[in-house]
């Protein structure tokens, strides 16, 4: 396991988000990116989580809600990486994976695309 401090890990997550094409980034609606040290206790190996209502599930009743959250978990990610480059790649994959959930893309399709 490699050590990457919290500030550097946040930088990596923000850099991954910044790689989105502008036309896709402009479609992110009411969503915020967070880095947390640990995944939920019931899924300790989880690398990321989308917590919200996907764009494909929103209807006319959607409004006045807190932003959806994309959570990237630092310690589980570091546990599977050996180098900082591994961390960069894993964070990128995880950020893209969770953003895809915001757009309504499910895990099966993400697996087909190589983002599982």
Image (cartoon, rainbow, N blue to C red):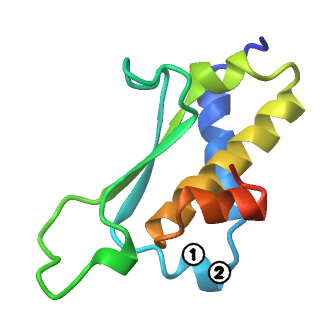
Residue 90 image offset from top left, x and y in percent: 75, 39
Residue that label 2 marks: 22
Disc 2 residue crowd, few under 14, some 14–19, many 20+, Cα 10 Å: few
Residue 28 image offset from top left, x and y in percent: 46, 73
Q: Which of the two residues, 58 or 23, is positioned nearer the viewer here?
A: 58
Quarter of image, res 13: top right
Is residue 4 among what the camera can see? Answer: no
| Residue at (62, 86) in percent of width and height | 23
Quarter of image, res 115: bottom right
Residue 69 image offset from top left, x and y in percent: 37, 51
Image vertical order of residue 46 relative to residue 5, above or below: below
Residue that label 1 marks: 25
Which element is circle 2 on?
A: helix
Image vertical order of residue 32 relative to residue 37, above or below: below
Image vertical order of residue 36 relative to residue 94, above or below: above
Instruction: Specify whether 31 is left or right of 46.
Output: left
Circle number at residue 73: none
Disc 1 residue crowd, few under 14, some 14–19, many 20+, Cα 10 Å: few
Q: CA distance from mark 2 to mark 1?
A: 5 Å
Quarter of image, res 114: bottom right
| Residue at (48, 19) in percent of width and height | 44
| Residue at (85, 32) in percent of width and height | 86
Instruction: Specify whether 3 is left or right of 13.
Output: right
| Residue at (74, 21) in percent of width and height | 80
Q: Which of the two residues, 4 or 72, is positioned nearer the viewer here?
A: 72
Which element is circle 1 on?
A: helix
């Amino acid at each position: 396991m490699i050590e990457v401090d919290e500030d550097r890990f946040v930088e990596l997550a923000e850099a991954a988000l910044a790689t989105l094409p502008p036309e896709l980034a402009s479609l992110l609606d009411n969503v915020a990116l967070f880095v947390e040290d640990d995944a939920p206790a019931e899924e300790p190996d989880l690398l990321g989580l989308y917590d919200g209502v996907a764009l494909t599930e929103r209807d006319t009743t959607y409004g006045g809600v807190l932003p959806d959250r994309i959570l990237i978990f630092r310690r589980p990610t570091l546990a599977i990486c050996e180098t900082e480059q591994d961390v960069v790649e894993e964070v990128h994959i995880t950020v893209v994976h969770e953003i895809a959930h915001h757009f309504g893309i499910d895990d099966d399709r993400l697996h087909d695309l190589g983002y599982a």
